[in-house]
Amino acid sequence: MRSIAALVVGTAVASIVYWVGAVIALLAMHGIPLGSPGGPPTGADLLVHLMLAAVGTFAGSKVSMRIGRGRRELHAVALGALLAIIVLSGFSKPNNWPGWFGSAMAAACILGSLAAAGIRRTRP
């Protein structure tokens, strides 16, 4: 049960970090009033979303590792895999994003979780 809770809370944290960052980036890059100018995203939009996916997954993985028991790194990797599957299913429908973007965002989620699993906190 604790491992499932760790994944649920980690997913929530990753989603919140990603979406708050996405709203801030949208406002900073496209201005107010809020809204998309339409058309395909720019290269900067793509880069920001990939970075936010990695950072959000990193944060969610760290939280998941903190909550989970046993081999905590597995919680981070499982979260990255779960988010990658969610991203791939979300980009399976036609949209304005490039065809490769769903796979790149899934890879960013995996890399964010691997980075979280690889960084260990050392105590003096």
Image: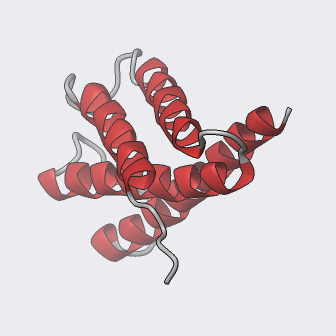
User: Measured along the vertical axis of the image, is residue 67 above or below residue 11?
Assistant: below
The spot of residue 59 in percent (x, y) is: 52, 59
Q: Residue furthest right?
A: 1
Please state if 35 lies on the left or on the right of 71 as rendered: left
- Residue at image location 19% in from the left, 25% down from the top: 100
Residue placed most toward the observer, 46 or 104:
104
Residue 108 higher or lower than 20, as above or below? above
> Against 53, is 30 above or below?
below
- Closest to the observer, 13 or 121: 121
Q: Position of residue 52 (x, y in %)?
A: 38, 56
Residue 104 percent location from the top left of the image = 24, 33
> Which of 94/103 is in front?
103
Q: Residue furthest left?
A: 43
Q: Residue at x 47, y 28 (%)?
A: 81
Relative image position of residue 70 (x, y in whole percent): 68, 40
Count of marks placed on residues: 0
Residue positioned 54% across, 28% down in the render: 82
In the displayed structure image, the side of residue 22 where residue 70 appears, left or right: right
Image quarter of the N terminus: top right
Residue lying furthest bottom: 124
Residue 104 visible to the viewer: yes
Left or right of residue 99, residue 37 in this image = right
